[in-house]
Image: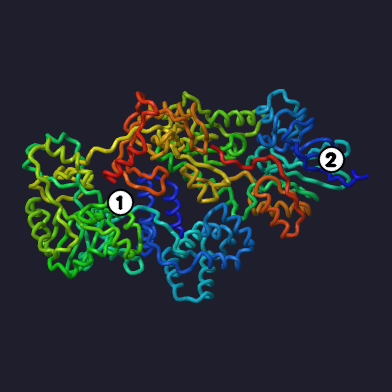
Amino acid sequence: MENFTTLFFELDSTVSVDSKILSINNYLNRSTHKDSIWAIALLLGKVPKRTATTFELRTWRCDVSDTPDWLFEESLKITGDISETIAILLPQPQKTLKISLSEVVSQILSLKNSNEQEKKAIVFDIWDTLNRDSRYLFNKILTGSLKEISSNKIIIKALAKHLNDPETIISHRLMTPWSPETVTFEKLLKTPDSSEALSKPIPFYLARSLTVNIDDLGNTNDWAVEYKWDGLRGQLIKRQGKVFLWTRNEELVTDRFPEFNLIKKSEKDNFVLDGEILGWKEDKSLPLSALQKRFKRKTLNKKLLSDIPVAFIAYDLLEHNGKDIRHLSYVERRKKLGILIASFSPNSTILFSDEIKFSSWTGLENIRSNARAIGAEGLMIKKINSAYGIGRENSDWWKWKSDPFNVDAVLLYATRDNSFRSKNFSSFTFAVKHNDRFVSITKASIGLSEEELIDISAFVKKNTIESFGPVKSLKPELVFELSFEGISKSTRHKSGVIIRLPKIERWRKDKHPHEVNTLSDLITMLEHYG
Amino acid sequence: MLLLFMPLLQFTNKGIYCEQADLYIDPWKKVPKALITHAHSDHARSGHKSYLCTHETLPILKLRLGKHIPASGIAYGETIIVNGVKFSFHPAGHIIGSAQIRAEYKGEIWVASGDYKVEDDGISAAYEPILCHHFITECTFGLPIYKWDKQQKVFDQINSWWSSNASEKTTSIIKAYSLGKAQRLIHNVDQNIGKIFTHPAVEKVNNAFREINIPIAKTIPLSPKVTSKDLEGALVISPSSSSELLNNAKSISVASASGWMMSRKRRRNGNIDRGFVLSDHVDWIGLHEAIKASGASHIYPTHGNTVTFSRYLKEQGYQTEIVKTEYAGEIDID
């Protein structure tokens, strides 16, 4: 257990990805497989269902610690964490034997079928064995309140290094739902399992942002163009009659989208589709915010399902009736895809991502600038003779996003960098005009140069109206041009709009604050594109 | 004869007052005569007509309040008598020179703790319990969650952090008070790991102590001349991590060493890479040890978690009275 505790607090005390990978690696090197599988699960936030409540822990604590309850309450105000407070207030452990992480967890799991007295006895026993920091983690695991500690990516990297396997293999093996209660380290990470293969997604082929001049792509006949939809990239799998839906973040989300489960019975072919999960209603795409709303909910009710129906816009076919066809050309794959989708029942929610006809690159630029109006965020340009690749390795797929929205806004608040390394202000809140006042619309922090930040910080020092800790409210004087990728309605923000991925384009020293955009300008944008 | 019933030490809006001797302990308003427990600015203020403090505190008092202030020194354990009241200064273990002040009159004994800790830090004169009837105690960390590990354990953590940074040529910076925590760190870290640099504010204090022959290990003051090469793998003790003098450091790791680091929330919100739980104030366990060892039945908690601490003491059967003072306790710096 101490090994895991060390790992936890090492990860807790650094933001550097490299140090985190190193810490995990060190842990794996010094731990048994039995412990490692649990450590990986816990790091990823896979915590067993709680077998005791924090309320129970608080009550039981009173039997072994002489701190009165009111004093416990006062202490809790400071730490803000029940598990931590209990861990500190318990008396020093008396038992000297060591207990491993897997033993601790198996004790925790065993409580499932115990009565209160038995539970208490086991918890006391473990409390009396662990040191303060380990107790804290024990309490967290026991009460199911341990949060994800490390990202998938970091763990995959550390495991790949530890096992000396490519990251793609590790990520494959970790992708399917697994539980440390039923799988061993060897089985999950060291042995390919054919029965698991059914749900396994194929690595996504990623497009690169168009950095070259569009004319440099050469002959327009070599390229096909589709809309770039503003949804969630997904992979829809049907193998041996079973359906799986994955997102690009390697999350299995089949149960969040019961719409697609229907194809289990209705379609006879097996396939793996690459496409976009989109909110889709009355033949039109819904904004990403709607889909996110649906995505966040753990339980789906009828209303949500009917308010925000979804579609899968398929743009590629990777596997057909058990055959990997990624090596075929784009044109060939798309031909098969078209036939497949045409064979689906008429009320299918799987749609074909149409190709856009165009004759010249200039003509395409016009289409791109109108993409927003139909709910797309730009265009995808794909080489017609290209195979389906892995990752972001070559330049056969380009994404060509529509130009961002632009707005001139005045600087209203500045926040000091939350890193101690800088004395400059680096996070800013901007406002537009509304009647005779300014109403803030967004926070933005990227886009300014180091010199500009210094100049702005100097301005802040002289023009602060009020200070709220690190936040300074300012005389509205400096004007900036902001760009952003999307706009949607918000009931939480005073302005009524929320803008996505804002970036500070430039400092408009030529503009006066009364020349900035108005809130009604933004509402208009919202009505057109939101 | 109401005066007979007046307590020996009273709590006034200027500070802790002894009417019989007409002098104050750590007053925060200007008074004619002040006894000073230690030189932290919340206890040692400017403008008094006369100061009395330990010999070790004297140079710092002069450094901070002016060379020519009317101050004199006294040895630990030495007694002075003012209008029949016996005063003496006893080690408080808080920082170098810090003292508890004992006052005795007609058999009644009071002790004002100032700031203190019970663990011997190796560089300050170690805390000594003083028997008394009335004990005025700080309680900065008067909650049971504040329990300090033995200092050696904390320094093992600090050393391993420093040496692991050093192996990557990263500069280790510990934010610390220039008086007290800085000297404790310098004295107790493993000096074989690398060079120790100090912020000028720290170095001034170091030099003042060196002048009275208190052995402070060799440190190098930060200056614009210090290059990035010099700072590679070094340890810097500074009250602030955003000093311009640190601009040369290429890669840094910033730590805080304070009692507040006990809470994970504080460690995570502090804009620091590491938080070490190291305090110059007494912890919950130490508070109870000290109170017990003093033998006092009347306890006066001053700065810190006074309300909770006093309620707890009452439940334990002590007579307590919370005393409002203007002492700050341990402040989060930077």
Amino acid at pointer 1: Lys
Discs 1, 2 touching: Cβ within 8 Å: no
Q: Quadrant of residue A268?
A: bottom left
Specify the quadrant that holds the N terminus of chain A: bottom left
Is A232 left, or right, of A464 in this rendering?
left
Does residue B87 show up? yes
What is the crowding at mark 2: few (fewer than 14 residues within 10 Å), some, or many (at least 20)? Answer: some
Q: What number is the disc on residue B327?
A: none
Query: Are dots 1 and 2 on a single chain?
Result: no
Q: What number is the disc on residue B86?
A: 2
What is the crowding at mark 1: few (fewer than 14 residues within 10 Å), some, or many (at least 20)? Answer: many
Q: Tell which subunit mark 1 falls on.
A: A
**Residue found at x 10% / y 50%:** A330
Report the number of numbered marks.
Answer: 2
Q: Residue B245, relative to residue A116: is it above or below?
A: above
Q: Nearer the viewer, residue A339 or B145?
A: A339
Amino acid at pointer 2: Lys
List the residue tagged with mark 1: A157
Is B278 left, or right, of B78 in this rendering?
left
Place of residue A193 in the rendered image (x, y in percent of width and height, measured from the top left): 22, 66
**Residue found at x 25% / y 49%:** A230
Q: Quadrant of residue A38?
A: bottom left
Place of residue A262 in the rendered image (x, y in percent of width and height, measured from the top left): 21, 67
Q: Tell which subunit mark 2 falls on.
A: B
Is A316 left, or right, of A492 in this rendering?
left
Place of residue B249 in the rendered image (x, y in percent of width and height, measured from the top left): 43, 32
Residue sticking out furthest to the front: A435
Disc 1 is placed on an element classified as helix
Q: Nearer the viewer, residue B173 or A164?
A: B173
Place of residue A155 in the rendered image (x, y in percent of width and height, measured from the top left): 33, 54
Does residue A430 show up? no
Disc 2 is placed on an element classified as strand
